Image (tube, helix red, strand yellow):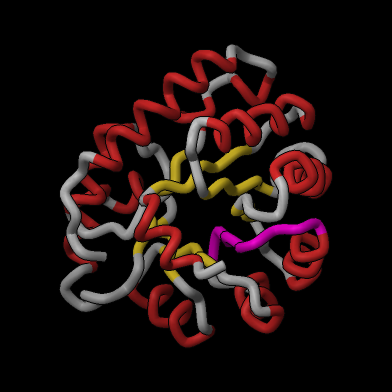
Amino acid sequence: MELLTGLRAHRIVAIVRGDDADATLRTVVTLAEEGIALIEVSLSGKDALGVIRRARAALGPAAVLGAGTVLTAEDARAVRDAGADFVVTPAVCEGVTESVRLGLPVLAGVMTPTDIVAAQRLGADGCKIFPAAQAGGPGYLKALRGPFPDAPFVPVGGVDAGLAREYLAQGATAVGVGSPLTGDATDGGDLDALRRRARAFLDAVRTSPDAGR
């Protein structure tokens, strides 16, 4: 799977984490059914590796499933074995280097220009600006475009549908969306409401200006 191609085509990564593994799996499957093509299951959720395995079995080999909160080399190997197609880290860490070594596409978590340079040197496919809201929101992304005009950026953290449009207008390759999309679904909440949120986010990213990233 060519991660950057997928990010540029679909413009959104769903981030799924929860304390109920069965509800988390239902959330992943529902998002896929609604057309969310890139889904990340965070290792901070309950039985995340099991959720990835079960989602892979339910959705088949064509589904694009990622693993998030990958911090260590052991994490990277475990998510590869569970069936993850790509890796997302919260920082420039051992999870990045091992994922690159394993041939897994990786979005490395960054906050500063120093982080961005380090992630690029390690071979990360893109940079997850995290936490994006605390870093300065769309204005910070715009500022980063000066020294890093071609870097693939994916802002994550507090991204609602309106902010998704703003980030994409400022040149984000895609946005990562967690609780504003998943809501209470990972705790057994309303899946119909989840479907409505998924459609709203898909509409937001599809109608956002294309900044060519």
User: Up-down: is 128 above or below 63?
Assistant: below
Where's residue 144, x and y in %?
A: 23, 67
At a point 46% along the width and 81% down the height, the residue shown is 118
Horizontal arrangement in the rendering, residue 72 relative to residue 212 (left or right):
right
- Quadrant of the rendering where the N terminus is positioned: bottom right
Q: Nearer the viewer, residue 37 or 40?
A: 37
Question: Is residue 70 one of those drawn in magenta?
Answer: no
Residue 97's place in the image compared with 144, above or below, is: below
Q: Looking at the image, which is closer to me, 57 or 100? A: 57
Q: Position of residue 65 (x, y in %)?
A: 63, 52
Q: Quarter-wise, where is residue 129 in the image?
A: bottom left
Q: Is residue 68 visible?
A: no
Kindly identify the residue that appears in the image at 78 percent across and 31 percent down. 21
Residue 74 location in percent, x, y?
Answer: 80, 68
Q: Nearer the viewer, residue 77 or 199?
A: 199
Which residue is at 20% across, 69% downward? Answer: 145
Q: Can residue 141 be spotted in the picture?
A: yes
Numbered disc total? 0
- Which residue appears at 62% of the width and 79% of the height? 100
Residue occupying the far bottom of the picture: 121
Tell me residue 25's x, y (percent).
72, 33
Main SS of the magenta part reads loop
In screen coordinates, is 211 left or right of 180? left
**Is 31 located above or below residue 94 in the figure?**
above
Quadrant of the rendering where the C terminus is positioned:
bottom left
Magenta span covers which residues?
82-91
Tell me the quarter of the picture where residue 69 sits: bottom right
Quadrant in which residue 94 is drawn: bottom right
